[in-house]
Amino acid sequence: MRIYLDHNATTPADPSVVAAMTSALQQQFGNASSVHSFGQTAKTVVDEARAAVADLIGAGPQEIVFTSGGTESDNLAIRGTAEALFPTKRRHLIATSIEHEAVLHTLKDLAKRGWATTLLPVDDSGVVGPQALDAVITDDTALVSVMHANNEIGTIQPLAELAAIAHRHGALFHTDAVQSIGKLRIDVADIGVDLLSLSAHKCYGPKGIGALWVRRGSRLIPMMTGGKQERNRRAGTENVPGIAGLGAAARLAIRQAETEAGRLAALRDLLEAGILQRVSGTLVNGDPTRRVSNTTNISFDRVEAESLLIALDLEGIAVSTGSACSSGTLQPSHVLRAMGHSPHRAQSSIRFSLGAGNTVEEIDRVIAVLPKVVNRLRTVARASSTPSPQSSPVGG
Ligand code: PLP
């Protein structure tokens, strides 16, 4: 039995997505900008997908810009807004310290080019308090970017409150909703944001396609120069098969946010309770209630997360760590560190992210396997940290 518990990394394409993409590749293969009937047929596919994505978030179709995924959407939202507002002298950008690298590295880059940037702290459950934003925002702030749900711990941010603060200061508000699409019901009017990023491969769509929702009237400088596609906001021939796949994924996500969330929360809670009961030295990271239904992040005291990941993989169970390998050294998760957890806790934490295919039998198997795997790793760690007689210092 192979068990996939890494849906926050990526998801398998739904059969409806594969069917839509296959049809776009084989039948609606025209260039969506061409005037002839082949082009117009492809354009219909793009228009239908645009309507589906707009429906998913309660937006208007003309406000959707197709991109190559979450990373490009985040870049376009931040760089596009920063550049558009440059002449207004608003040169301050704010994000949280637990954003995805697509946001963090974009801010870092803009900081090198003269923008002032501020990263907001989070509390020990990974939530950004409105007072933290209140304390740093000024009338020079151009954009505040706060993710909807965190990819490592699943914590959901109080977007409406934060967006209201940004707007009081005349700043725009962007949210990276890559991890909440299909998990939470989203209405851009309710959460009060101006820009929203999403990505198809996190919700049973294909990789390499996503969208940025831009509130009508928001100013945005495109990042790429070229053709006039996407109402001059994103040049390049439309990726019709990818867009068709995103459209199908969006239709599915609308249903899933209604129907799957309860089932996944029950499975996730079963998994979490089983682990906490049967494995000593375990703690849940993140807010226990204010989080998406499919995610739990657990630290295993005295266990290297990477070793646990590999040991579980050998048992056919795929999970993930928040650690990132940078220049050959394992960096503890920036999210867990920002929450105030020690490097040890941050390096002994595993993310389990559930999805459509998971069953109770799979969760039972994970709960059965984990205690013995963790005990074995702890025994090995203890043995290797006990000095051998030869290497003991000679006394006297
Ligand atoms: N934002 C978040 C929160 C993510 O989890 C990811 C993917 O890991 C991204 C952005 C990047 O999306 P993509 O892989 O489509 O570029």
Image (cartoon, grey):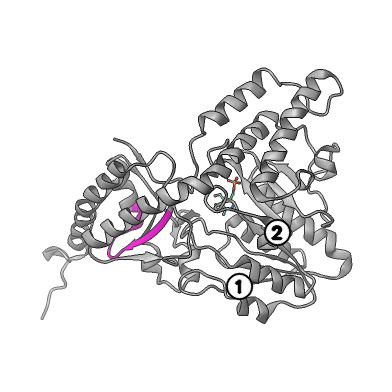
Q: Given this view, does label 1 or label 2 mark the residue nearer the observer?
A: 2
* The C terminus, quarter of image: bottom left
19 displayed left or right of 273: right
Give the label on residue 319, or none: none
Q: Secondary structure at mark 2?
A: helix
Residue 302 among those drawn in magenta: yes
Q: CA distance from mark 1 to mark 2?
A: 24 Å
Task: Kindly state the secondary structure of the residue where label 1 is placed.
Answer: strand
Q: Nearer the viewer, residue 366 or 337?
A: 366
Q: Name the residue tied to disc 1.
A: 120
Where does residue 6 sit, x and y in percent of width and height?
Answer: 43, 46
Residue placed under numbered mark 2 in the picture: 189
Q: Ligand 1 closer than 8 Å to the CB at disc 2?
A: no
What kind of residue is marked 2? Ala
Residue 353 visible (yes or no)? no
Residue sitting at 56 percent across and 65 percent down?
157
What segment carries the magenta color?
A: 295-306
Quarter assignment of residue 269 = bottom left
